Image (tube, grey):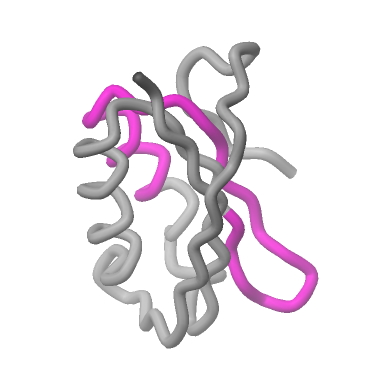
């Protein structure tokens, strides 16, 4: 069973390697999805995979990489996307 989540992250999350670190962590965990910057200065993430692994990723996103300062994390349930294979950075 796969779980999918859409996550909106605000704080000091652009210009600090947040997208690259997110991609690296998601790939390490074997998750599918994507990450992108938002026009408002935040980051949006879509992640799917084993429910317990998705929860581990959510915990990581709450902290982010060194240099980031996460102020707010909003998590929404999402429908899994069977077309996703791997994890990528989107424009």
Q: How many marks?
A: 0
Residue 14's quadrant in the figure?
A: bottom right
Q: Position of residue 63 (x, y in %)?
A: 27, 71
Give the left or right position of residue 58, taking residue 48 as reference: left
| Segment colored magenta | 21-44
6 over 49 or under it: above or below: below
Give the left or right position of residue 17, taking residue 39 as reference: left
Residue 26's quadrant in the figure?
A: top left
Q: Position of residue 31 (x, y in %)?
A: 36, 27
Q: Position of residue 17 (x, y in %)?
A: 43, 59
Residue at position x 55%, y 43% in the image: 46
Q: Nearer the viewer, residue 73 or 24?
A: 73
Q: Position of residue 20 (x, y in %)?
A: 44, 46
Residue at position x 36%, y 27% in the image: 49
Give the left or right position of residue 18, taking residue 77 as reference: left
48 over 67 or under it: above or below: above
> In this view, which residue lies farthest toward the right?
39
Q: Nearer the viewer, residue 73 or 52?
A: 52
The quadrant in which the C terminus is found is top right
Q: Is residue 31 magenta?
A: yes
Residue at position x 56%, y 51% in the image: 6
The quadrant in which the N terminus is found is top left
Q: Is residue 59 magenta?
A: no
Q: Nearer the viewer, residue 50 or 63?
A: 50
């Amino acid at each position: 069973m796969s779980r999918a989540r859409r996550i909106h992250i605000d704080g000091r999350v652009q210009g600090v390697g947040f997208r690259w670190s997110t991609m690296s962590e998601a790939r390490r965990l074997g998750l599918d999805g994507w990450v992108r910057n938002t026009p408002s200065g935040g980051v949006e993430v879509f992640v799917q995979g084993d429910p317990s692994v998705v929860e581990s990723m959510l915990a990581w996103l709450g902290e982010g990489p060194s240099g980031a300062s996460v102020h707010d994390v909003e998590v929404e349930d999402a429908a899994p996307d069977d077309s996703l294979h791997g994890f990528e950075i989107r424009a």
